[in-house]
Image: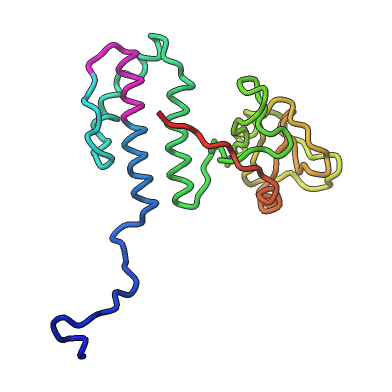
Amino acid sequence: MDARQPGAVRGTGPIVAPIAINLLDLLARFVADSAEFHELVTQAAGVERLPSPRSAWTDPTPYLLRARPWLSVALDAGLDERAVAGVLRGLADAVAAHLGEVHDGQTLDALCPWCRGRSESAPVGGERTLVVYARLSRLEQAGRTSPSPDRRTTRPEGPMIVCRGESCTPPDSDVGWWVGTHPAWPEREWTWLADRLLPAPETVRV
């Protein structure tokens, strides 16, 4: 039967979606995080809130615009700055991950294999403590930089990944640099480091 005739069976072949599924997930997260940011700020500031998003495809812009002018008021009223930063930083990291990029201050979605994410707020571990410092100025703000005793290398000029964990002390043979008391790895060692990272526990979003 001619494939052009009515009723002929046609092979569908590959179906090209109009938009990548993972991008849809990212857009849905953008809406959810924008609404959460708006909820935190308006509740703390004591101002009227917008209705909750009707779907994952609601325009997030009104939520951001509503929260922005009240952020300082909310912080003065006692809003936990870390809660707000956590929402916004998580969103920025998700966008960067989708684009295949890293940005200054990005927290990696993985656990340090040496301290296993132990910190003051997570003494048993599990916290994401690996942070990208893309600019040397941020490194200098974080602490004095110095080479590991087992390495004889020049001071790196590019970005570093720094573990901000509590008492993270890998052996000198596994550390490329130190930022204050925190181990750090210059960009040239990121492939080596990636092979050793542990998966981070899933975050339950409510």
Q: Residue furthest left?
A: 6
Q: How is the image coloured?
A: rainbow
What segment is highlighted magenta in the picture? 35-48
Residue drawn at (36%, 56%) of the image? 20
Image quarter where the C terminus lies is top left
Viewer-closest of 155 and 88 = 88
Q: Nearer the viewer, residue 74 or 90?
A: 90
Vertically, is 13 above or below 21?
below
Residue 42 drawn in magenta: yes
Question: What is the x, y in percent for residue 161?
Answer: 64, 41
Please tell me which residue is depicted at 31% across the width and 29% down the height of the picture: 35
- The residue at 49%/21% (across/down) is 82
Q: Residue furthest bottom?
A: 1
Residue at 58%, 42% (x, y): give it: 134
Prevailing secondary structure class for the magenta stretch in the rendered image: helix
| Image location of residue 39, percent across then percent down | 32, 22
Q: Quadrant of residue 71?
A: top left
State the image coordinates of residue 122 (x, y, percent, origin top left): 62, 23
x%, y% of residue 128?
59, 34
Left/right of residue 147 with respect to residue 38 in the rendered view = right
* Vertical side of 175 occupied by 41: above or below: above
Q: Quadrant of the N terminus?
A: bottom left
Quick one: which residue is furthest to the top in this view? 77
Q: How many marks?
A: 0
**Residue 61 inside the magenta-drawn segment:** no
